[in-house]
Amino acid sequence: MKLFDYMYEIADKISKTNDYQILNELLKDDIKGLRDVRNFSAHDYEGIDLFLIEHTIKDDLPRFKKNIKESIKKLG
């Protein structure tokens, strides 16, 4: 679960940096999703659905990685 915290912290820093405003727009839904998972895990750790976490790791994180790579290509 700590990985989600780190990912959110990085995404939050990116969202506050004007240099990456285009990246923020392209990834705003992914950043919101990271924030939601992080907040849920921080405030209701015992109520976490492990199947949801497994789905996030298997399905959402690879999509997030792909979106980041595509966004970086658009910037370059």
Image: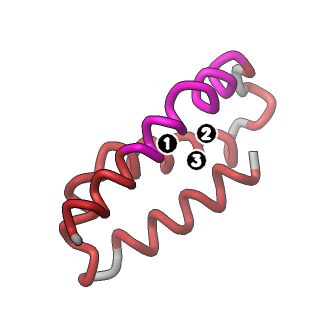
Q: Is residue 46 left or right of residue 69?
A: right
Residue 28 marker: none
Q: Amino acid at mark 2?
A: Phe
Looking at the image, which residue sits at the far right?
A: 46
Image quadrant in which the N terminus is located: top right
Crowding near the residue tagged with mark 1, few <14, some 14–19, many ≥20 C-alpha atoms within 10 Å: some
* Main SS class of the magenta portion in the image: helix
Q: Which span of residues is magenta-colored?
A: 51-66
State the separation of the CA atoms marked 3 and 2.
Answer: 4 Å
**Percent of width and height locating residue 65:** 47, 47
Identify which residue, 23 or 28, lies in the foreground: 23
State the separation of the CA atoms marked 1 and 2.
Answer: 6 Å
Residue under pointer 1: 36
Residue under pointer 3: 39
Crowding near the residue tagged with mark 2, few <14, some 14–19, many ≥20 C-alpha atoms within 10 Å: some
Q: Are marks 1 and 3 in contact (CB under 8 Å)?
A: yes
Identify the residue at image location x=68%, y=41%.
Answer: 41
Crowding near the residue tagged with mark 3, few <14, some 14–19, many ≥20 C-alpha atoms within 10 Å: some
Q: Are marks 3 and 2 in contact (CB under 8 Å)?
A: yes
Residue under pointer 2: 40
Judge whether residue 42 is colored magenta: no
**Percent of width and height locating residue 29:** 31, 43
Q: Amino acid at mark 3?
A: Asn
